[in-house]
Structures are given as C-alpha cells and as structure tokens.
Image (cartoon, rainbow, N blue to C red):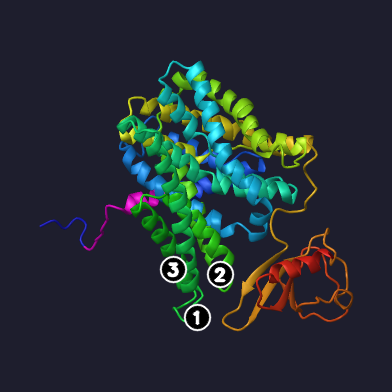
Amino acid sequence: METGNRGAMSIQLPADWWILLVAVLLVGGVLAAGFANRLRLPGLLLFLVLGMVIGDDGLALVSLSDPRVAQIGGTIALLLILYEGGLTTKPGDLRQAALPGSLLATVGVLITAGVVGGGAYLLLDVEPLTAFLIGAVVASTDAAAVFAMLRRAPLPRKLASLLEVESGANDPIAIMLTIGLIETWRADPGIGDWVTFALLQLGGGLGVGALAGLAGTWMLMRPNLGPEGAYPVLALGVAGLSYGAAAAVGASGFLAVYVTGLVVGARVPLHRRGIRTFHQGLSSTAEVGLFLMLGVLVFPSQLPSVVVPGLAVVFVLVFVARPIAVLLTLGWLRYRWQELLFTSWVGLRGAVPIVLATFPFVAGHPDGQFIFNMVFFVVLVSAAVQGVSISTVAGWLGLRGESPTTTSVAEDVPIGDINTELIEVRVTPDLHIAGKQLKDITPPHGLITAIMRGKRTLIPTPRTRLRDGDLVIVAIPRQPDASKLVTTWARGE
C-alpha cells in the first residue's frame, strides 16, 4: 500500500495547462502592446511576433499544423471584428462618408487587387492566377489597425469618417474576390458565372444583413427579455444568424454581418452602451487571439525566401496600386491633395489578408504556402513601416490638430424603459462649455443632472463652473438625434 503521500490528493484536467498558457500569453501580450503603443508601434504586430516565437519554428510551445483550424478560428474572429465595426460606426459618419467610403471599399479594392496582381505577374515568376490571388488577398485594409491609428493620430472628421467606413466595409469585397479566384482555379467558371456569383454575394449579403438587422432591432428593443446582460448575448446571436442565413443562400456572410452591425448600432439606443462594450471586448480578444494564432501558423525559417518578392509586392501595393485606387475613386470628390496622399499612405494591412491567405492553402492550391508566406511578410512590412509613420506623415501634411478627437463628444447612456436618455459629455478645452458657469450655458433640450470631477460627484448649481476633464451628465427626452443635439450644445454651434 502506497503511504508516502497519504492525504495529498490532486486532479489535473487536460485543459489546465492550455488555459494557463493562453492566460499568460494574453496578459503578457496586452502589457507588451501597451508599452509598444507608447513607442508608436502597432501593438498587434507584437502578437504576431509572439506567435512566431512560441510556434514550431521558435520555442515549440504551441503547434498548429492544420491550417484548417486556423481558417475556422480566423473566420470566427473576422465575424466578431466586422460586427463590432458595424456596431460602432456612427450614423453621422456613415452619411458623411457613404459615397467616398463605399467607392473606396468596392471599386478601390478591385483596382488594388488588379494592379497588385498585374505587378506580381510581371515581377515574379508565378502563374497569373497565383499573382491575382496575391492581389485579392492584400486588397483590403484592416479595420483594427485603422481604428487604432485614428486613436493615436486625430484627424479631421471628414477624413477620419472616410477611413473608418472604408476599413469596415472593404473586407467582404476582398473575401469575395479571393473565394471567386479559388473557385476559378477549381472549376474554371465563365463570365456569366462570375457575374452571378458577384451579384449573389453582394446583393444577398446586403439584403440578408439588412433583414437580420431589422429583426434583431425588433428583438433587442423588447423591454422584458431578461437581465441587462442578456441583450449583448442576443445581439451576438443575431450576428451569427445573419452570417448563417447569408451563407445558406450563397451570399456573403461577412458583408451580411457588417450590415447587420450597422443597422443594430444605429437603431437600438436602449441597450447601446452594454452591447457596444461587450462586443468591443469580444473584438479585441478576437484580434489578439487571431494574431497570436497566425503567428504560430507561420514558419519564420521560410520567410527569407520571400523577402525579395515580398518587397516587390509591397512597393507595388503602397506606391502604385493604392495611390491609383485612391485617385480614381476620390480624385473627383473635392478632396485636397494632402488628404488624397494621406489616404493613400494609410492603407494598413492586418489580420484579414493573413486569414484570406489560408484559403488557397486549405483549398490545396499548389502555391498556397508561397501565397501565405508572401502575404504574411507584406503585412509585417505594412504594420512596421506604415503603422509607425502615420502620425509623422499626418503632421507633415498638416492634417493633425484640425479635429480634437475622432470620437463623439456626447454618448448615449440609456437608463431603462422610460422615455429619457442620459448623455455623457467629457469636457475638453476646445469645447464651448469649458470654463463656463452653468447659468450661462443651460442646455436647450435637456437638464444637467450631475458632474463627475475626478472621484467626486457634484450636484450642479447655476454657479458651478465646468472644468477640463469633467464628465457632464445630461438628461434629455429620448429621440434619434439626442447625442447630436447635446454635441451641438457642447460645441457652441
């Protein structure tokens, strides 16, 4: 009878060490990303590098030998990122940048893919289909990278809205192009098949996304569905239904999810804050996990062989394809040359191209591994060069400081089923209300109910003077343009 460790009992589950490893990677990666942000480095770039370090070619702590697992995980992560992008796109920005943003996200993606594909065919020793697959995969900009850039380098509202709409809306077009080219390799479709495919993908994605968004809006506006925390989960379920329904009819599930996010974000004021906060957290987690996983999937020892062709593709993409796409789509819309030049430079590539690069790999395309390594290298260079220099380029072109922030001055904080909303306003020195006494700046459409100053809560009086950093709470009757009205008041417009 074994008595050496009498009384010492323990149990270990198979998932224990995986949970610990993932937790250590997430905590360490986020802390490292915060440090990188101070140095103006793209934080997600560190997660890619970290994934390479712990992968098969590094410390071999994690192995991801099956690219299909990465594709499934990448698809789920893309859905979360696109849905959150739709939820957080402000209706005012969408209206302001609808035409230029949609042109750059559709026609611009097609031009970029075509020019990069043609350049790759001329400069590299590859088949035409391989060259245009590379062009399609790298044709879209990355929403996560662009949103992070806008937080670091405030831009004029017109330009910030354009970049937000473009980066949120152009992924589905690149995904459709990539899938279409893979099907061309598999089945050799004709022109009619391509037209039918494109119309079904785009039209079906828009239609299903809008219907799912309207149905989700109806459900999310019901007052008695359960505790407050149930509404963000329901919103997530609506996103999944949108993608699944679109995929079932052969439409673009990615486009459907983005459109559903736009509709829900614009038409559900009651639980907006909780839904957005929940999905922003999911999206951030998905981005971190996605970049870690993609870093694990790549073999750094294979990258030196694609350095020269990768640099050639980067040159064509950054200095030829992107400027041509921007000039042809926006040149006639009264944008200044500084804005066109900056828009050309901020075509940041990120997670979406790397995920799309797994599609030919999983499909068994003979150049699948080459395409993946090429695209991975292009993303690394784009993040390292363009991501670091964006703030500097904005300063050179005189595009910084014209707008104090890229976020709303006022934000809804719905307070239940009564016909009232609370609107938060963070006081900054550029606002008309800064330094004023409340008796001189009474809101015409609402009532100031409280002022948060540091850790104190002030009960407002007519002689209370607003200071930089105060959080002003305004109660206003519920209406579609409540935030806009309070924003107008705060800016003195």
What is the C-alpha distance between the residues marked 3 and 1? 13 Å
The answer to whether 479 is drawn above or below residue 118 in the figure is below
Inspect the magenta stretch and tell me whether residue 8 lies in it.
Answer: yes
Q: Amino acid at mark 1?
A: Pro
Q: Residue at x 50, y 28 (%)?
A: 377
Which of disc 2 and disc 1 is earlier in sequence?
Answer: 1
Residue indicated by mark 1: 223
Image quadrant occupied by the N terminus? bottom left
Which disc number belongs to residue 268? 2
Which disc number belongs to residue 439? none
Which of disc 2 and disc 3 is earlier in sequence?
Answer: 3
Which disc number belongs to residue 234? 3
Q: Residue at x 48, y 33 (%)?
A: 136
Instruction: Name the secondary structure under disc 1.
Output: loop
Which of disc 1 and disc 3 is earlier in sequence?
Answer: 1
Q: Position of residue 471 (x, y in %)?
A: 73, 69
Instruction: Name the secondary structure under disc 2.
Output: loop
Q: Amino acid at mark 2?
A: Val
